[in-house]
Image (cartoon, helix red, strand yellow):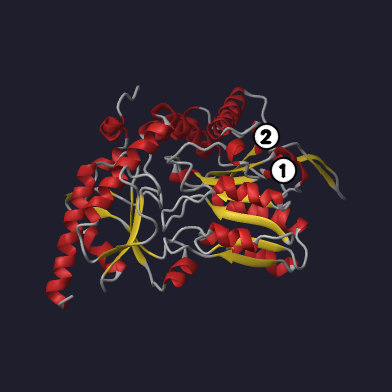
Amino acid sequence: MTFTSIKTIADQVRKDFPILNEQVHGKPLTYLDNAATSQKPTSVLNAWRDYYEKYNSNVHRGAHYLSAKATDAYEAARDKIANFINAKSRQEIVFTRNASEAINLVAYSWGMNNLQPGDEIILSVMEHHSNIVPWQFVAQKTGAILKFIELTPEETFDLEQFKNLISEKTKLVSIVHISNTLGCINPVKEIAEITHKYGAKFLMDACQSVPHTPINVQEIDCDWLVASGHKMCAPTGIGFLYGKLEILEAMPPFMGGGEMISEVYLDHSTYTELPHKFEAGTPAIGEAIALGAAIDYLTNIGMDKIHAYEAELTAYLFEQLAQIPQIRIYGPKPDVNGEGRAALAAFTASEVHANDLATLLDQEGVAIRSGHHCTQPLHRHLGLAGTARVSLSFYNTREEIDVFIKALKETLEFFASVFGE
């Protein structure tokens, strides 16, 4: 498949996503909850099914044909991830269940063994719970101190505060690349550079960026990167950790069991080389293979084209939302070309509860997210109980945005007529 025009990406790919033909409450599905999870193309579903139907076997452990084929496909997926984010080595890619497990791996393997009382960990108030709770665990056990970067008046990462907060006491900076609520794109390359000047390590949560824009870990110079497959057209239950080779080599295993060992004796064990020392037990083989297929799919379209098309959608979405006076969107505004923020909008609408909005929109077949989006500290910082969130992907269309806007206006009109709002 060759994509020749960024304006027609959605038209060309929608046929690849069977779920987009579904009906919800008798209405065509308008799926606008992509920041929570993406839909899966047929090629990804087929890759997963082919593994179980044609060569289901455990990896690395068998001499027979099925095991060898499964191992080749599983390890090929690792190569695809390494190329996708421009890692130096395939050994720098560790399969995990999701980004949460990847962060926990770093927290328990590196954090527990490198942090001392009084050491400082810098996070931000916009972090997903998965990039806060593991560090709370580590801080409680090691005596390290958590510090948080707040927001600029434009509701973006406060880089100047970060420059003032970081010090020789800082040992780790762990920051999201793109906020799943504010949509802001954080200056991760500059954050990494500043972090390294102080001899600290930088972990980047790339869950909302890897599926939507080209990522180059060598250019960014992050020490670790985490991502979840289910947000990038792959199945649930699979994600990955990228780590610089020398850092991963110095980290002890996260979990013990089969696969991660070299020799096991009754009183001690030795461990295998990277990346397998971090992959204890039978992995999610079919899911990893399907993640490789998802990367093939995204690469075939072109991440630069996906980014450009989603920017067009973002500009259109914000133009339409601007016509509804009750709407308050959080995070920075995009420029006229839709650049400068992610293809999502978390918003409130007067006094209408976000859950009520989402429920009534669902009756029109429109799927959006409502609640705190696993960013309770951010919502508390903003003085909000929750927000509604619409989030786009490359298979969405302007027509779907029109359906959403029409349903949103009608919903707000309904609440105004009933409650006088």
- For disc 2, the marked residue is 91
Q: Nearer the viewer, residue 279 or 243?
A: 243
* Left or right position of 200 against 85: right
Q: Earlier in the sequence, mark 2 or mark 1?
A: 2
Badge number at residue 248:
1
- Which residue in the rendered view is the most extreme toward the left? 417
Q: Split into 4 quadrants, where in the image is the C terminus? A: bottom left
Residue plotted at (51% across, 59% down): 128
Return the x and y of residue 184 as percentages of the image width and height: 44, 53
Circles 2 and 1, Cβ within 8 Å, touching? The answer is yes
* Amino acid type, label 1: Leu
Q: Nearer the viewer, residue 314 or 39?
A: 314
Residue plotted at (43% across, 68% down): 379
* Left or right position of 75 against 34: right
- Which residue in the rendered view is the most extreme toward the right? 267
Return the x and y of residue 151 as percentages of the image width and height: 48, 63
* Amino acid type, label 2: Gln
* Left or right position of 108 against 41: right
Return the x and y of residue 282 as percentages of the image width and height: 62, 42
Q: Nearer the viewer, residue 54 or 325?
A: 325
Q: Alpha-carbon neighbours of circle 2 within 10 Å: few (<14), some, or many (≥20)?
A: many
